[in-house]
Image (tube, helix red, strand yellow):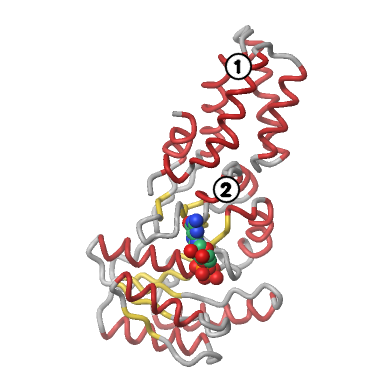
């Protein structure tokens, strides 16, 4: 799915509301700013960011002597684009001289398994040899679900029994990856939130195994967040992200929410780039995040 289709709900929930407001009020007064503020906060752009944005709009309105609210539309979209654009490179860090190891983290239900399947498919399409590691040995059904995605994408899955040590699964997976000379090893991990310290220990153990077996690995630690949970996704990322060496975010289910403004809030409040977005449930519905495309899809 392309941005345009995937962002339909946010276009309705955010952009169309803003356009309606501009058409309806025309006059740029305090009430106009208040309503605009409400719409933006409602779309999860984030209170602090909205305040800054409105202040900047006020400045532009004065500077350019704008009287008709409709003239604010291009200025607003440009401001949003500026807010989204970071210094960060959204491309994935790849190992040029061996196996690239990509680790996925994220709490249950956010779309981690689906994203791994989509990512495997993506790399396969690019002609890469991919292997999956079933590192979520905790959640019932996680291994089987990953296998289903492996079959769909045409990629093998290295697994052990449910309940086994994830670090041991990773060890097996790395050995298999070396033997089979794969390009990319994608590792699933457990996502239970209730035992945070255990999860961190488990992750650290996994890191150690991977680092020992493949110098420079993991090359990416991607944290998966569910866009439909809005500000919750943001707090999850704050809680986990910076401590667990996360190198990039994948924001799933953007197609399922009118609150796509969460992308802006994440960009503003975290130092971790959104590298991919999920725009549907199918294998093809994963897109590299491009801020310009994103804003264009919303406003065009
Ligand atoms: P996990 O527990 O994190 O592994 O989550 P799953 O991969 O099982 O996904 C949970 C649900 O979210 C499934 O029903 C997926 O089809 C759905 N899902 C995942 N990504 C997306 C997405 O980008 N868009 C939509 N609409 N649904 C998604």
Residue 73 visible? The answer is yes
Q: Secondary structure at mark 2?
A: loop
Residue 3 x, y percent position in the rendering = 42, 43
Label 2 crowd bin: few (<14), some (14–19), many (20+), radius 10 Å: many
In depth, the one of 167 and 191 nearer the eye is 191
Q: Quadrant of residue 25?
A: top right
Between 143 and 132, the residue placed more toward the observer is 143
- Within 10 Å of disc 1 (Cα), the crowding (few <14, some 14-19, many 20+) is few
Q: Which mark is residue 87?
A: none
Q: Secondary structure at mark 1?
A: helix
Find residue 231 and report its horizontal and vertical position in percent.
68, 51
Q: How many marks?
A: 2
At horizontal 25% and vertical 61% (from top left) the residue drawn is 125
Asked whether mark 1 and ligand 1 are closer than 8 Å, the reply comes as no
- Give above or below for 184 relative to 69: below
Q: Is residue 287 left or right of residue 52?
A: left
Q: Which residue is mark 1?
A: 23
Kindly identify which residue carries mark 2.
257
Q: Quadrant of the C terminus?
A: top left
Choose the circle earlier in sequence order: 1 or 2: 1
Looking at the image, residue 80 lies above or below residue 19: below
Answer with the quarter of the image where residue 32 lies. top right
- Residue drawn at (58%, 78%), measured in percent from left and top? 204
Q: Is residue 22 left or right of residue 166?
A: right
Distance from label 1 to label 2 (Cα)?
Answer: 24 Å
């Amino acid at each position: 799915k392309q941005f345009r289709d995937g962002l339909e709900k946010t276009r309705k929930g955010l952009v169309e509301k803003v356009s309606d407001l501009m058409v309806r009020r025309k006059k740029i007064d305090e009430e106009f700013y208040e309503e605009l503020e409400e719409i933006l906060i409602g779309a999860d752009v984030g209170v602090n960011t909205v305040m800054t944005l409105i202040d900047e709009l006020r400045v532009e309105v004065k500077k350019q002597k704008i009287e008709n609210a409709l003239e604010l539309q291009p200025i607003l979209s440009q401001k949003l684009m500026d807010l989204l654009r970071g210094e960060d490179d959204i491309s994935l860090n790849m190992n040029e001289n061996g196996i690239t190891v990509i680790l996925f983290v994220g709490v249950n239900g956010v779309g981690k398994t689906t994203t791994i399947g989509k990512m495997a498919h993506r790399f396969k399409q690019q002609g890469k040899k991919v292997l999956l590691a079933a590192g979520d040995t905790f959640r019932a059904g996680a291994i089987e679900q990953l296998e289903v995605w492996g079959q769909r994408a045409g990629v093998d899955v290295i697994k052990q029994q449910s309940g086994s040590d994830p670090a041991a699964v990773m060890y097996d997976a790395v050995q298999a990856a070396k033997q089979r000379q794969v390009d990319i090893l994608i590792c699933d991990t457990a996502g239970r939130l209730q035992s945070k310290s255990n999860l961190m220990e488990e992750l650290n153990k996994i890191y150690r195994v991977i680092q020992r077996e493949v110098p420079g690995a993991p090359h990416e630690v991607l944290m998966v967040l569910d866009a439909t949970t809005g500000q919750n996704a943001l707090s999850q990322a704050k809680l986990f992200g910076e401590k667990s060496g996360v190198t990039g975010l994948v924001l799933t289910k953007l197609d399922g929410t009118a609150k796509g403004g969460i992308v802006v809030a994440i960009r503003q409040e975290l130092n971790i780039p959104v590298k991919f977005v999920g725009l549907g449930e199918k294998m093809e519905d994963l897109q590299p995040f491009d801020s310009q495309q994103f804003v264009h899809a919303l406003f065009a």
